[in-house]
Image (cartoon, grey):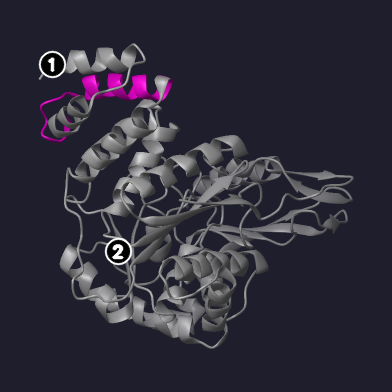
Amino acid sequence: MDARGILATKRDGRRLSDAQIREFITGYVAGEITDYHASALLMAIFIHGMEEAELAVWARAMLESGRVMKFPGISRPKVDKHSTGGIGDKVSIPLAPAVAACGLAVPMISGRGLGHTGGTLDKLEAIPGFCTQLCEADFARCLERTGVALGGQTPDIVPADRKLYALRDVTGLIESIPLIASSIMSKKLAEGLDALVLDVKFGSGAFMVEPSRGEALAKAMLALARDFGVRATALHTNMARPLGRMAGHALEIAESFDCLEGRGPADLRELVCLQGGEMLRLGGLAKTLDEGRARVARSLDDGSARATFARVIEEQGGDPRCMDDRARLPKASRVELVRARRDGVLAWRDLRALGGAICELGGGRVKLGDAIDFGVGLEFEALEGAAVRAGDVLARVHHEGRGLARALAQVERSFELVDAHAPQPLVLATWTA
């Protein structure tokens, strides 16, 4: 194999052949292609992009670099959801047990937080004893017994993505639409899904800040779903403001428990019901989205979603008593108040600064492997567009003293008090494969 020929093709803006793509992915996973060759090709893709058919071959080669899970003992429709992430985005945690209580199987491979966004696996590990490192047999057992399995990517699931993502991370090549789309979809397709709902964020707290970029990413992922014969829908949702009132691992778990008890913030419940309703529709358990939404709402209100998650926690080694006794969750020992300096209307300006604040407190990672303080985080008292008066509490900072001054500066930078502000809608658009 001459890696230089593959690099030259994309360097010159030409389409990679199917054979070149397969040779590259196979060679890189086997260690026959060096990181510096791979970095050069990723940079060329970052600059020139990929055609739709080219990207489909790339994603298939990534998927076929490892195992695809199969669950012959599960007769339920297998449907998952993926979000591109943001501040306070905890939807997956109440969503999975809610739709499982309605009859779906949810095999969910999730990731860890890095940068300004939190990761679902880290949030789940704020539950005492909860194990997210599941081998394929454990994954299948949890799925069969509870209808939900919440785990991380194992070494034999899309190993090409594990290597390429790490390389993209250290070379500044994360925010490439074809590379993001193939990374997400190869992992999701490895779950052996029947259908998939995608939550693609826009706004200052999202990876794709501009709505047009988010739309391009959503449509790239939907095209891959069509190519693999997986029914899929993408929702374009708002990350120009925090989702819910809590950001931080244990705080978000507690708010997820509230949602599972028919309480909690309205925007979180709305997205759980909307995305869950679409999952039921795609899985054939609801004829319409409205029917699916109503079923998910009932599961939250009648206790069946909560009971399902209690079984999930127990099956994955956690302590379900924390659902009743929130004191069993990690908790910061100190709280600092952020107050309005003048009268005005709250407008969020830079949500990445909120993620930065949580990292300063010890609740995020600068690099993979960093330890996390599960108890720290932010609690928002004022909603976007709310009129406040000087001295009103806007947020509570849960902390242990570490990085407090820097975190407070980041929080202050994240918002403005203005004369008038009209928030954007929670859901901007919906597309179906």
Extent of the magenta region: 28-47
Q: Residues within 10 Å of mark 1 (few under 14, many from 20)?
A: few
In the depicted view, which residue is nearer to us: 407 or 415?
Answer: 415
Residue 46 shown left or right of residue 411 in the figure: left
| SS assignment for the magenta stretch, majority | helix
> What residue do we see at 27% from left, 36% from top?
57
Amino acid found under the numbered disc labelled 1: Asp
> Label 1, label 2: how many angstroms apart (C-alpha)?
40 Å
**x then y, percent, for residue 312:** 35, 77
Q: Secondary structure at mark 1?
A: loop
Q: Which residue reaches farthest bottom?
A: 302
Up-down relation of residue 236 to residue 287 (above or below): above
On the question of residue 403 being in view, the answer is no
**x then y, percent, for residue 210:** 61, 36
> What residue do we see at 48% from left, 61% from top?
249
Mark earlier in primary sequence (1, 2): 1
In the depicted view, which residue is nearer to us: 297 or 354?
Answer: 297
Residue 110 shown left or right of residue 432 in the figure: left
Residue 43 in magenta stretch: yes
Name the residue beneath numbered marker 2. Answer: 132
Amino acid found under the numbered disc labelled 2: Thr
User: Residue 126, which numbered label?
Assistant: none
- Examine the image and state in which quarter residue 133 appears: bottom left
In the depicted view, which residue is nearer to us: 354 or 10?
Answer: 10
Q: Secondary structure at mark 2?
A: loop
Name the residue beneath numbered marker 1. Answer: 2
Q: Residues within 10 Å of mark 2 (few under 14, many from 20)?
A: many
On the question of residue 286 being in view, the answer is yes
Quadrant position of the N terminus in the picture? top left
Residue 296 in magenta stretch: no
Residue 36 shown left or right of residue 271 in the figure: left
